[in-house]
Image (cartoon, rainbow, N blue to C red):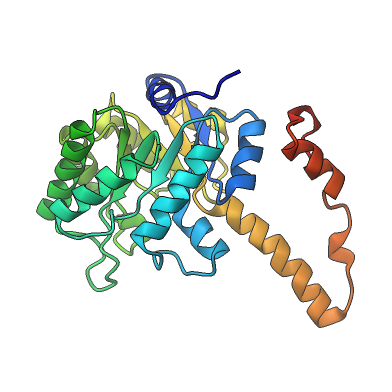
Amino acid sequence: MPSPSTADKRAVFRRLHESGCFVIPNPWNIGSARYLQGLGFKALATTSSGYAHAQGFADGEQSCDEVLAHFREIAGATGVPVNADFEGGFADDPGRMAENVTRCIATGIAGLSIEDSTGDPNQPLYDFDLALARVKAARAAIDKAGGDVLFTARTEGFIRGRPDLDETIRRLKAFADAGADCLYSPGIKTREQIEATVKAVAPKPINFLNSGAFGFTVKDLAQLGVRRISVGGTLARVAMHAFIKAAREIADAGTFDGFAGVVTNAELNAFFHGDFSKRPKP
């Protein structure tokens, strides 16, 4: 069976946002991406933190070229749509950011997100007018490239020390009106916050970041009107946590109990050889 084309994957991704609720987990390399695809997830999303940590960087320290190469690698290695965590677009200026969005589209991704975080702890969010101009510039770049890439606009106040729900909703509504296809406010956690953001941008879809033990199931979030559920860098941190725990045991205690019950080499070989019926189990 031939692999789906980039156009096919983009069409599938857009349809996923039209109704219902789906989980879009975040792999950080080809192996994790292919395993998640093997579990039956219909789409995937990159994670800036997960990929950065795997490469030995802090989140946000990698270059645009490095990140674009990662997008191309993940999109080319999987048969499902991939959304690109394109952070702030690697430029403050809307025009330069739009040029980078054009480069991002060329990697074969099905969707991309742009956030309003500046990276400056003293002024963590772009001023409203500039943030809106950046969303409009990203929208224009996507339209110029054909318009089939799904555009998610993010406002980062709740994870950048500005947890103001009214300002978050103001930005989400403005971003929706400026042409964002999907809206995202990472860091909101309560039922009331979720319901408020869903209502504010309806009928456009909301992405909810389920990066901790908030007590919500997929069914719960679907009932609240969430269309898309991502996990950010959490799966990558789960893997890093297990590695750190086992490595520290060896270094500190000289024991290897952390190796008990781990997936076998044979199981992983069978899976990556193409036998998805033999998915490794914990």
Residue sitting at the far bottom: 252
93, 68: nearer the viewer: 68
Q: How many numbered discs, if any?
A: 0
Residue at 37 percent of width and 63 percent of height: 63
Q: Can the viewer see residue 264?
A: no
Residue sitting at the far front: 2
Residue at 55 percent of width and 35 percent of height: 78
Q: Using the image, determine if residue 155 lies above or below residue 258.
A: above
Q: Using the image, determine if residue 38 lies above or below residue 25.
A: above
Residue at 50 percent of width and 46 percent of height: 73
Residue at 74 percent of width and 30 percent of height: 276
Q: Can the viewer see residue 238?
A: yes
Quadrant where the image shows the N terminus = top right
The x and y percentages for residue 99 are 21, 49
The x and y percentages for residue 41 are 58, 30
Q: Using the image, determine if residue 115 lies above or below residue 147.
A: below
214, 86: nearer the viewer: 86
Q: Is residue 93 left or right of residue 4?
A: left
Q: Is residue 12 left or right of residue 165?
A: right
93, 251: nearer the viewer: 93
**Residue 280's quadrant in the figure?**
top right
Residue sitting at the far left: 129
Q: Is residue 271 left or right of residue 232?
A: right
The x and y percentages for residue 45 are 47, 42
The x and y percentages for residue 222 are 48, 27
Q: Using the image, determine if residue 253 lies above or below residue 10.
A: below
Quadrant where the image shows the C terminus = top right
**Residue 60's quadrant in the figure?**
bottom left
